[in-house]
Image: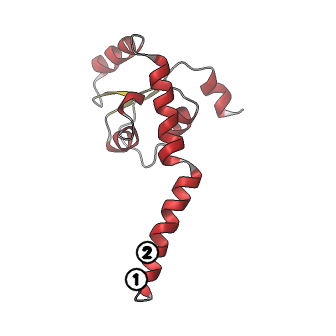
Amino acid sequence: ANVDEYLGASDYFISASLAEGLPNTVLEAMACGVPCILSNIPPHREIAQFNKSSSLFFEINNINELVDKIKGIIVEDYEVMSVASKKIIYDHLSAEIMSNNYQSIYNVLLMKTMGI
């Protein structure tokens, strides 16, 4: 099954993770333009800092706040959240951009080792 088909059928994406490395599921949802409700762990915050309109946050282990965010997201502007989610991926976290960022880091390190 294709993940993008399921995400395309979804109105919202919720991640109640207590801990993550790089939260690929959140990135996949955002790439599909699915607005997110996310636990306020640092990796989620790091992604959303590129465009705060993409997501709503709740305190981890706070089920009441999560319920409030689920109820509250329906009054948010879906199109604004969807576009913001896509922009995060395409403007900051696409494979091409990430590759270029890594290449820049490697080039700086290489130049340092060569004394340049």
Marking on residue 108: 2
The Cα atoms of the two marked residues, 1 and 2, are separated by 6 Å
Residue occupying the point 55% across, 59% down: 99
Measured as percent of width and height from the top left, residue 82 is found at 50, 25
Q: Which residue is drawn at 65% across and 31% down?
A: 4
Determine whether the residue tagged by mark 1 lies in a helix, strand or loop.
helix
Res 70 visible: yes
Q: How crowded is mark 1: few (under 14 residues within 10 Å), some or many (20 or more)?
A: few
Looking at the image, which is closer to me, 21 or 102? 102
Q: Which residue lies furthest to the front in this view?
A: 116
- Displayed quadrant of residue 41: top left
Q: Name the residue under label 1.
A: 112
Image position of 115 (left or right of 12): left
Which percent across, then down, holds residue 61? Answer: 29, 28
What amino acid type should be assigned to the residue bearing mark 2? Val
Marks 2 and 1: in contact by CB < 8 Å?
yes
In the image: residue 102, left or right of residue 58: right
Can residue 26 be seen in this snapshot? Answer: no
Examine the image and state in which quarter residue 77 appears: top left
Q: In which quarter of the image is residue 48?
A: top left
Which residue is more in the foreground, 59 or 50? 50
Tell me the quarter of the image containing the N terminus. Answer: top right
